[in-house]
Image (cartoon, rainbow, N blue to C red):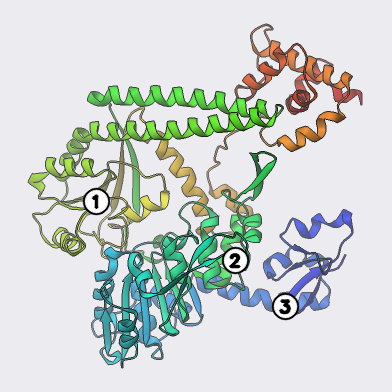
């Protein structure tokens, strides 16, 4: 086997026995050329031992450029003169970010929240005087903030003109605006951007369904900026489709949380910025999303892309293609670090609500386990039985979600007195506090209970014109000591540095949303240590949620923030527990149906005997500590063991349990496959 290089591609041919040598590092099989290929020098470097002279020379050059880009993506300073208005100055890492953006046609600025991504965009406009027509797309609550920052940071000689169009404006209005002299910036929120494009309904030839398509009639822009770009993670959403249809010579996407939950959410953004480097979702998902097929009934399978894999490689490729990301702890030495606390409060008057949560949670968990086991057992039954079991599981999950949401809301309402007590105590020791919650009635009750602190609120119901006024009052009025906001509406873009204490009265399932919210205080301008407290009732579901959110955040950290040599990365991260699935979980109905006819009567009897022996060991019939089925397999194993005789399909299902528990069966001398 030999590694070669030609036409910007590293490639090798292998025998069947050698195929895993290039496959495991990440080479892709080219079916037409009958060879393994990659364009990634870091992937090719893993086969350096097999490289010929041409491949070695190409690797030296590619890796030199690759490592330079990686270094630039983490740079905290740059030797570059960037003009800015009198009295202002860019920080070193902001200069490095401006240099990174200026050198590339498409960039994802993924710096942590509070590091001045807006200022870096302004620096680009001051540096590149060839940029004239600009569209900034952002959440509605950030439009005025963008206007303020542009007016503050753009050089007077750039002749800045800013427009914030409403739905009453037309496409022609924007065209006329951009055709004027000077630097022309239109700021539009995601929710109304579709009103400035043309729409047509056409039939998709593949699905035969009507779909809306969008077209931009204003020519090619010099620069398109998408702030809070994680809004574009769903490529089927209207706002994603509209943004993607807008042509621009340069694209800059800004988000402090490039990865809010799962790696798959990154792909629409990456493909939009650089379709050549990130051309194919399935290849992306196969490598970075742990893509695998799942059984969905009636002989059908579907792909599951919700996982995560090869995250260190993903971060490396992100940085070597289009992402610059610096952490506050690396670039803002004067900014105090955050401290997070999960405070479990005594249930007290809310005890009955916590108890109701626990009863419902236990009941639903037990019920869902039974329904899941029924699905596993139904794999050996007819199609109707299996579909009925799947439908029952889905119905049970929906019922559980609905009831638990209602109970969590009731618990949050019951917890209000303790949240008020905690905040009132905190206000005795410090100036101001920011509180985040989820439900409107919870926010209203908190505001009513803190009237002496003259609170301001910001939720989705707050009029747009009033939002910035509420923020300004909190920032500047000493009498206004409390800001209360909803996690979604007030969690992005705002600056609340007048406070250094953040309290979450309710939680959000998405870790990126919590990080966004707490960083309203932990950003440039903050002079104090920031304390973030999650108030949860002892024994409540919020306490469980906090642990799960930490686990999700670790996946995000792995993909975006982990540095250091690969061999040390595992030691830098906590070991996360992974939920165990039953032994039959990864076996499809199709495989069971295929294997069942191959089982002899003798093998079926041996499988049945093995299951019965395991069932006897774990139900107390024998005093053997640690023997028999574990909890996850008990119901399935006992159900199969209880039959007078097994059908071939049931035996094929039970075979998975026999193989899983072969150690015990070997000890007893009855493992059937030792005799083969």
Check the image and report above or below for 7 versus 417: below
Please tell me which of labels 1 and 2 falls first in the chain: 2
Check the image and report above or below for 616 versus 635: above
C-alpha gap between disc 3 and disc 1: 51 Å
The residue lying toward the viewer, choosing from 42 and 174, is 174
Position of the N terminus, as image quadrant, is bottom right
Q: Nearer the viewer, mark 1 or mark 2?
A: 1
Give the side of residue 229 with respect to residue 313, left or right. Answer: left
Q: Position of residue 218 (x, y in %)?
A: 40, 83
The local crowd at label 2, few if under 14, some if 14 to 19, many if 20 or more residues have their Cα within 10 Å, is: some
Q: Position of residue 148 (x, y in %)?
A: 24, 74
Instruction: Say which residue appears at 53% left-offset and 43% top-offset.
Output: 574
Please tell me which of labels 2 and 3 falls first in the chain: 3
C-alpha gap between disc 1 and disc 2: 37 Å
Q: Which mark is residue 485?
A: 1
Q: Which mark is residue 423?
A: none
Locate residue 373: give its quadrant: top right
C-alpha gap between disc 2 and disc 3: 16 Å
Give the side of residue 230 with respect to residue 311, left or right. Answer: left
Q: Which mark is residue 317?
A: 2
Please tell me which of labels 3 and 1 falls first in the chain: 3
Q: Is residue 82 visible?
A: no
Q: Which mark is residue 8?
A: 3
**Marker count (numbered):** 3
Locate residue 14: give its quadrant: bottom right
Position of the C terminus, as image quadrant, is top right
Instruction: Say which residue appears at 43% left-offset and 61% top-offset.
Output: 230
Q: Position of residue 176 (x, y in %)?
A: 31, 88
């Amino acid at each position: 086997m030999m590694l070669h290089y030609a036409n910007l591609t590293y490639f090798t041919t292998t025998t069947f026995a050698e195929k895993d040598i290039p496959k495991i590092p990440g080479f892709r099989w080219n079916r037409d050329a009958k060879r393994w290929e990659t364009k990634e020098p870091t992937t090719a470097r893993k086969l350096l031992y097999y490289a010929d002279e041409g491949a070695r020379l190409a690797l030296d050059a590619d890796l030199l450029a690759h490592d330079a880009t990686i270094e630039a993506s983490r740079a905290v300073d740059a030797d570059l003169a960037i003009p800015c208005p009198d009295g202002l100055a860019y920080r070193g890492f902001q200069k490095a970010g401006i240099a990174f953006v200026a050198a590339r046609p498409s960039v994802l600025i993924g710096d942590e929240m509070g590091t001045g991504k807006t200022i870096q965009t302004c620096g680009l406009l001051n540096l590149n005087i060839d940029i004239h027509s600009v569209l900034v797309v952002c959440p509605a609550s950030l439009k005025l903030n963008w206007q303020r920052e542009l007016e503050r940071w753009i050089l007077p000689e750039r002749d800045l003109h800013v427009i914030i169009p409403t739905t009453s404006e037309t496409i022609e209005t924007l065209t006329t605006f951009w055709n004027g002299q000077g630097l022309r910036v239109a700021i539009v929120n995601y929710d109304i951007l579709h009103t400035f494009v043309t729409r047509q309904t056409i039939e998709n030839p593949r699905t035969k369904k009507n779909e809306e398509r969008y077209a931009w009639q204003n020519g090619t822009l010099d620069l398109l900026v998408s702030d809070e770009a994680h809004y574009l993670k769903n490529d089927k959403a209207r706002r994603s489709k509209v943004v993607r249809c807008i042509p621009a010579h340069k694209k800059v996407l800004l988000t402090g949380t490039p990865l809010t939950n799962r790696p798959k959410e990154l792909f629409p953004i990456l493909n939009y910025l650089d379709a050549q480097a990130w051309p194919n979702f399935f290849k992306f998902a196969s490598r970075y999303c742990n893509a695998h097929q799942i059984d969905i009934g009636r002989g059908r399978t579907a792909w599951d892309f919700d996982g995560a894999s090869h995250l260190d490689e993903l971060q490396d490729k992100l940085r070597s293609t289009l992402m610059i990301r610096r952490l506050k702890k690396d670039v803002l030495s004067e900014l105090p670090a955050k401290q997070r606390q999960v405070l479990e409060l005594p249930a007290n008057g809310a005890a009955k609500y916590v108890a109701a949560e626990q009863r419902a949670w236990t009941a639903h968990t037990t019920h869902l386990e039974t329904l899941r086991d029924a699905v596993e057992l139904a794999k050996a039954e007819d199609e109707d039985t299996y579909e009925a079991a799947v439908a029952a599981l889905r119905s049970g999950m929906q019922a559980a979600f609905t009831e638990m949401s209602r109970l969590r809301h009731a618990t949050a309402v019951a917890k209000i007195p303790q949240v008020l007590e905690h905040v009132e105590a905190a206000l005795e020791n410090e100036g101001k506090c920011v509180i985040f919650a989820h439900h409107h009635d919870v926010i209203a009750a908190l505001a009513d209970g803190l009237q002496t602190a003259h609170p301001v609120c910001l939720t989705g119901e707050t009029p747009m014109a009033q939002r910035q006024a509420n923020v300004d009052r909190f920032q500047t009025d000493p009498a206004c000591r409390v800001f209360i906001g909803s996690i979604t509406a007030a969690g992005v873009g705002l600056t609340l540095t007048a406070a250094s204490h953040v309290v979450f009265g309710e939680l959000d399932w998405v870790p990126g949303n919590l990080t966004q919210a707490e960083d309203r205080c932990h950003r440039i301008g903050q002079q104090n240590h920031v304390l973030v407290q999650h108030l949860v009732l002892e024994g409540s579901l919020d306490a469980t949620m906090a642990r799960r959110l930490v686990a999700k955040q670790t996946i995000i950290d792995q993909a975006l923030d982990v540095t250091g040599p690969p061999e040390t990365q595992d030691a830098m991260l906590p070991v996360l527990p992974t939920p165990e699935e039953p032994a039959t979980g990864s076996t499809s109905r199709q495989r069971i149906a295929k294997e069942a006819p191959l089982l002899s009567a003798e093998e079926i009897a041996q499988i049945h005997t093995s299951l019965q022996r395991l069932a006897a060991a774990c139900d107390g019939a024998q005093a053997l500590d640690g023997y028999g089925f574990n909890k996850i397999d008990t119901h399935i194993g006992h159900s199969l063991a209880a039959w007078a005789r097994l059908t071939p399909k049931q035996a094929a299902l039970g075979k998975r349990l026999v193989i899983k528990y072969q150690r015990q069966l070997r000890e007893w001398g009855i493992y059937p496959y030792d005799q083969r």
